[in-house]
Amino acid sequence: MAYTETEIEVRYAETDQMGVVYHANYLIWMELGRTRFIESLGLRYFDMEQLGYLSPVIDVAIHYGKPLRYGQNAIVKTWLEAYDGVRVTYGYEIRYAESGEIAITGETKHVCVTKDSFKPVALKRVLKEWHDKYQKAVEGAK
């Protein structure tokens, strides 16, 4: 399975009053992981946007395990979970860098839309390179 791993240093500003990573910050780390994964395929969101397309999140699922704290390091593992030509699902596992214990697992679902109307489009028609690379990545995961 094709995946990337991105190391994150937990910063004090990312923690809450309880001293653990504030739950919404995991979404930011997932975005960092997703961006790195896409770059590993030789693609860039910036290029997609320059061509007039966006890839908004349409669904998020996060399952919390053991919370990370300030001063610890995390590893964000990201892979392509599913792709059907229109919708893309990325999988995530954020774990402790030191022990490998799971902090969270999750996924985000996206759809490609036109920048001006937010109308969904098929990647195969408008961004063939993205379609081909996603298809190859998801087939390699099976």
Image (tube, helix red, strand yellow):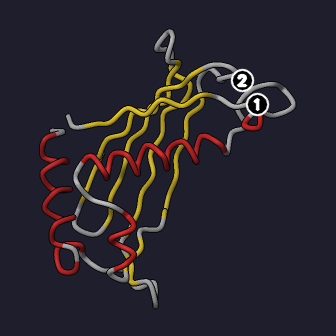
Q: Amino acid at mark 2?
A: Tyr
Residue depicted at x 59% and y 28%: 9
Q: Residue 19's image quarter? A: top right
Left or right relative to 98: residue 112: left
Label whose residue precedes the other's in the sequence (1 or 2) = 1
Place of residue 133 in the rendered image (x, y in percent of width and height, measured from the top left): 16, 56
Secondary structure type for disc 1: helix
Q: Residue 122's image quarter? A: bottom left
Q: Residues within 10 Å of mark 1 (few under 14, many from 20)?
A: few
Place of residue 18 in the rendered image (x, y in percent of width and height, measured from the top left): 84, 26
Place of residue 94 in the rendered image (x, y in percent of width and height, measured from the top left): 49, 30
Please identify the quadrant where the C terminus is shown. Answer: top left
Q: Which residue is mark 1?
A: 12
Residue depicted at x 52% and y 52%: 60
Residue 70 got which mark? 2
Q: Amino acid at mark 1?
A: Tyr
Count numbered badges in the picture.
Answer: 2
Residue 139 got which mark? none
Left or right relative to 77: residue 65: right
Place of residue 56 in the rendered image (x, y in percent of width and height, measured from the top left): 47, 68
The furthest residue to the right: 17
Residue depicted at x 45% and y 52%: 108
Q: Residues within 10 Å of mark 2 (few under 14, many from 20)?
A: some
Asked if residue 83 is positioned above or below residue 118 in the image, the reply reads above
Secondary structure type for disc 2: loop
- Tell me, yes or no, whether the two marked residues, 1 and 2, touch with CB atoms within 8 Å: yes
Please identify the quadrant where the N terminus is shown. Answer: top left
